[in-house]
Amino acid sequence: MGVEAVLRLTSAVALFAAMALWEIKRPRLSLAQPRSQRWPVNLALTLLDVALVRFTVGAATVVTAQAAAAHDWGLFHGLALPGWVAFVAAWALLDFAVYLQHCLFHAVPVLWRLHRVHHADLGFDVTTGLRFHPLEIFLSLAIKVALVAALGPPVGAVILFELLLNGGSLFNHGNVAIPERVDRWLRCFLVTPDMHRVHHSVVVAETNSNFGFLVPWWDRLCGTYRAQPAAGHGEMEIGIATERDPARLTLLGSLLLPVTGDPGRYSLRRERPEGERRS
């Protein structure tokens, strides 16, 4: 296991433990479905994702960045940019690409079928940030590898991007209490749990908002930012309207979810009739 992989694993485990402890000590909301029912499935999906990636493509983005540096591939190798400018620009482009990719997974029917595994969780806590279908993980990785090959970003920027992306997903899915005043301040530069929780609402217009994983700037610039859920955080329903039966959300049921059930509404259209408000 390379240094980058060890760094990602140790930082993810440490942040997960910190967020889980924070959730126990200062939870934001009471969850409709207890941890004992949700965590085994969410963590089993996580372990499956990690194992499949570890024993197939490994640290593909970093390896691609190293190859690009060795062979002068990509946009950044043709630009005479100061090192720190290239570093910051590379991270920003990669993070913006993840925002666009997230929008794409909501807009394209076959991709939404994969991504709804993440949204089908009936609760919202740190394990939700790890709950993804293995095929979505591979598709996301393929997109990132292609982008790294095209950009030729600094290797350090790619490592930082991966660390922040993983850490951001764990943090912004946390069921943790943050004072409202602090939350408003944090939203200037960071996606907070209250901001991202809106994205997990069953209401379509809310599901199709707040796509950013780390910084709120892309949502604000692109018009997809939504400050609060219409029903308020205490009353909003988490998940997707077509998957409300916990018995269907076992490990096997979650893996088969892309090819079973009704995918529901997924369009990114801004306006809908009242009867089509739920995903």
Image: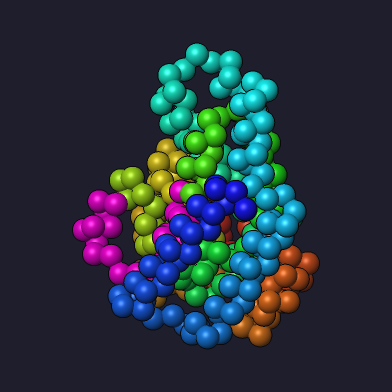
Q: Residue at x 63, y 68 (%)?
A: 47
Residue 125: where, in percent of width, then height?
46, 71
Say if the magenta span includes residue 195.
no
Location of the C terminus by quadrant is bottom right
196 relative position to 120: left or right: left
| Residue 199 seen in this snapshot | no
Q: Residue at x 34, y 75 (%)?
A: 27
Q: Residue at x 40, y 41 (%)?
A: 217
Residue range corresponding to the magenta coloring: 164-186
Residue 194 in the image: above or below residue 40: above
Q: Nearer the viewer, residue 271 or 70?
A: 70
Residue 128 in the image: above or below residue 115: below
Q: Nearer the viewer, residue 104 or 265?
A: 104
Q: How is the image coloured?
A: rainbow
Which of the 4 image quarters holds residue 114? bottom right
Residue 93: where, in percent of width, then height?
51, 34
| Residue 131 seen in this snapshot | yes
Which of the 4 image quarters holds residue 239? bottom right
Residue 103 in the image: above or below residue 176: above
